[in-house]
Image (cartoon, helix red, strand yellow):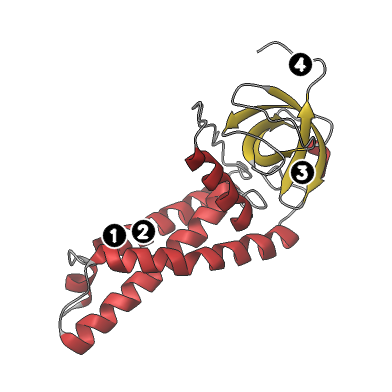
Amino acid sequence: MSFGEFITAPQVWPFSVALGLFFAITLLEVALALTGFGGNFGIELDPDVAVDTPIAGITGKLFAWLEIGRVPYLVSMAVFLFCFAMLGLFAQNIQFETIGRALPWPLVAFGATLATMPVVRLANRLLGRIWPKDVETSAVSQDSLVGHEAIVVLGVVSASNPGQIKVRDTSGASHHVLAYSDAEDESYTTGEHVLVVARRGASFAVIRHPNPTAD
């Protein structure tokens, strides 16, 4: 089987698409960096969805574990796509070489996703330590977000359950970060205004805003 036949095989197409998206994101990052539009790449990641379900809580905890937000979202996405694609292509290529046929792609995709998550977490942690601090990114000057007003945009923010908040820095750029309630007996739902009072690793602590601005 030629490389072209392999990369377009039905059992391989999800991983080929993921690899193509990785290269597209990489080219976009390079092009925008060269033209001076780095950072968040002008992408406003605001779900604008009122969600108050257990799924939102699970997603928030997963994002917290993955340390999403330490680097720009597209960087985390690129790492995931590359690892997912490489693992899937490698696994299916081994199957073609040894038994002449590939495994069902949903099975391989599930395994590749599980194997990729620890890599994404490690990459976010390591890159977050060295990411340039003199450019505007979702990971830049996050300590400076403390003291700013924010609005809950996804899930329920409680002391035990993280939710996503939207907060603007001094330059007006929006940051979407995970937050916990600093008060054990208080929780905040989508649309409520809160005040960022502390940073806790990749997430933040918030309280109810005493004097929120109008929406």
Q: Amino acid at mark 4?
A: Pro
Q: Amino acid at mark 2?
A: Ala
- Give the residue displayed 31% in from the left and 69% down from the top: 108
- Answer yes or no: do the residues labelled 2 and 3 have beta carbons within 8 Å? no
Disc 4 from disc 3: Cα separation: 21 Å
Mark 4 vs 3, N-terminal side: 3
Of tags 1 and 4, the one toward the viewer is 4
Mark 1 vs 4, N-terminal side: 1
Per the image, label 1 sits on a secondary structure element best described as helix
Where in the figure is residue 184, as x and y percent of width and height? 77, 37
Residue 14 is marked as: 1
Disc 1 from disc 3: Cα separation: 35 Å
Q: Is residue 163 or residue 9 the one in the foreground? A: 163
The answer, for residue 173, to whether it is visible in the render is no
Residue 18 is marked as: 2
Q: Is residue 75 left or right of residue 160?
A: left
Residue at mark 3: 142
- Give the residue displayed 52% in from the left and 31% down from the top: 52
Residue 45 is marked as: none
185 to 24, vertically: above or below? above
Where in the figure is residue 155, as x and y percent of width and height? 56, 34
Q: Amino acid at mark 3?
A: Gln
- Answer yes or no: do the residues labelled 1 and 3 have beta carbons within 8 Å? no
